[in-house]
């Protein structure tokens, strides 16, 4: 019964002619501004006319709602346990922009019940047709459950800073993922850059290391300057691209967004996006 229903949904999605780009936003360590990037990047995408959904996967430490000054009434956990419907757990933020809070107790993904797994697949089957881009704001580093989600998505945006330790951690993170799936699509962003040459150098070093040691190509999206407007925007609980649209960092974010969208191919069918198939395999691994 479930297989028949799922097959019907996939046919419907194929007929609609597109599936959302699924993107994990990651970092090698905490404190590099990953969630702040997610908030502003998502807002910038929405300003470009894209329908965007953020799913906060930084379980127990998620702060996307704080950066937007929003208070979610429900979380992904509420949907998975069946206490709330899918659209009940989606919190709208702006036109074309919404998010789902993670909630607590989702750390042990492999212990999810069969019904929770079915509901998760149902959710993403629907969401991939509702949105243009789905952003997963992951926790820093890699756990077993977060790695599974990272490997399932279509693309990865890695946030680093020019600090040597951050660059090392970023490379280690990409290497770890690349060894699991060699053809994963990586985008690189350097954040909190004090000097322009430092920003260019840090992303170039990461790109070169991936190419030299792992034979893996990466895409440089750009870098963001260290800017007091970021701190002011956090206090105001408003994305800096909205609060300070003419600031240098906002202009940089616009350039990053445009670079990302250059890789967007409209009309992606559900078959061209491996996200749902990979997601199913991930959860079934723990069931055999």
Image (tube, rainbow, N blue to C red):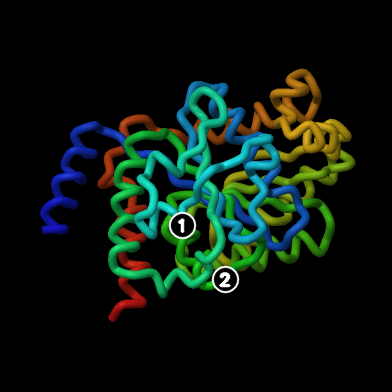
The residue lying at 70 percent from left, 23 percent from top is 242
Which residue occupies the foreground of this view, 164 or 254?
254
First in sequence, mark 2 or 1: give its number. 1
Asked if 141 appears above or below 11 in the picture, the reply is below
Q: Is 276 left, or right, of 136 in this rendering?
A: left
Viewer-nearest of discs 2 and 1: 1
**Which residue is at the far top?**
246
Q: Which of these two is toward me, 57 or 184?
A: 57
Q: Position of residue 119 (x, y in %)?
A: 31, 56
Q: Quadrant of the C terminus?
A: bottom left
Which element is circle 1 on? Answer: helix
Q: Position of residue 243 (x, y in %)?
A: 75, 23
SS of the residue at dot 2?
loop
Q: Which residue is mark 2?
A: 143
Q: Residue at 44% of width from left, 46% of height from top?
A: 22
Q: With 109 as the anchor, is 196 left or right in this view?
A: right
Q: Is residue 211 visible?
A: no
Q: Which mark is residue 77?
A: 1
* Residue 152 image point, x, y percent: 42, 58
């Amino acid at each position: 019964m479930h297989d028949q229903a799922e097959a019907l949904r996939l046919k419907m999605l194929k007929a609609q002619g597109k599936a959302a780009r699924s993107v994990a936003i990651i970092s090698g360590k905490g404190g590099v501004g990953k969630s702040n990037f997610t908030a502003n990047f998502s807002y910038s995408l929405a300003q470009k006319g894209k329908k965007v959904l953020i799913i906060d996967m930084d379980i127990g430490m998620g702060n996307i709602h704080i950066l937007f000054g929003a208070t979610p009434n429900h979380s992904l956990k509420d949907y998975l346990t069946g206490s709330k419907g899918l659209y009940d757990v989606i919190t709208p933020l702006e036109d074309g922009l919404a998010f789902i809070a993670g909630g607590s107790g989702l750390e042990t993904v492999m212990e999810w019940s069969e019904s929770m797994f079915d509901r998760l697949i149902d959710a993403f089957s629907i969401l991939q047709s509702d949105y243009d881009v789905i952003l997963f704001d992951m926790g820093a580093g890699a756990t077993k459950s977060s790695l599974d989600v990272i490997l399932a998505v279509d693309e990865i945006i890695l946030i680093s800073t020019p600090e040597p330790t951050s660059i090392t951690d970023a490379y280690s993170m990409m290497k770890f993922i690349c060894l699991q799936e060699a053809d994963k699509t990586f985008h690189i962003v350097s954040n909190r850059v004090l000097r322009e040459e430092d920003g260019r150098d840090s992303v170039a070093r990461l790109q070169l290391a991936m190419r030299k040691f792992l034979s893996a190509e990466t895409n440089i999206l750009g870098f963001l300057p260290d800017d007091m407007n970021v701190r002011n925007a956090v206090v105001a609980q408003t994305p800096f691209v909205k609060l300070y649209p003419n600031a240098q960092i906002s202009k940089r974010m616009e350039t990053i967004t445009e670079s990302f969208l250059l890789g967007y191919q409209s009309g992606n069918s559900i078959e061209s996006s491996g996200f749902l198939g990979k997601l199913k395999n991930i959860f079934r691994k723990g069931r055999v």
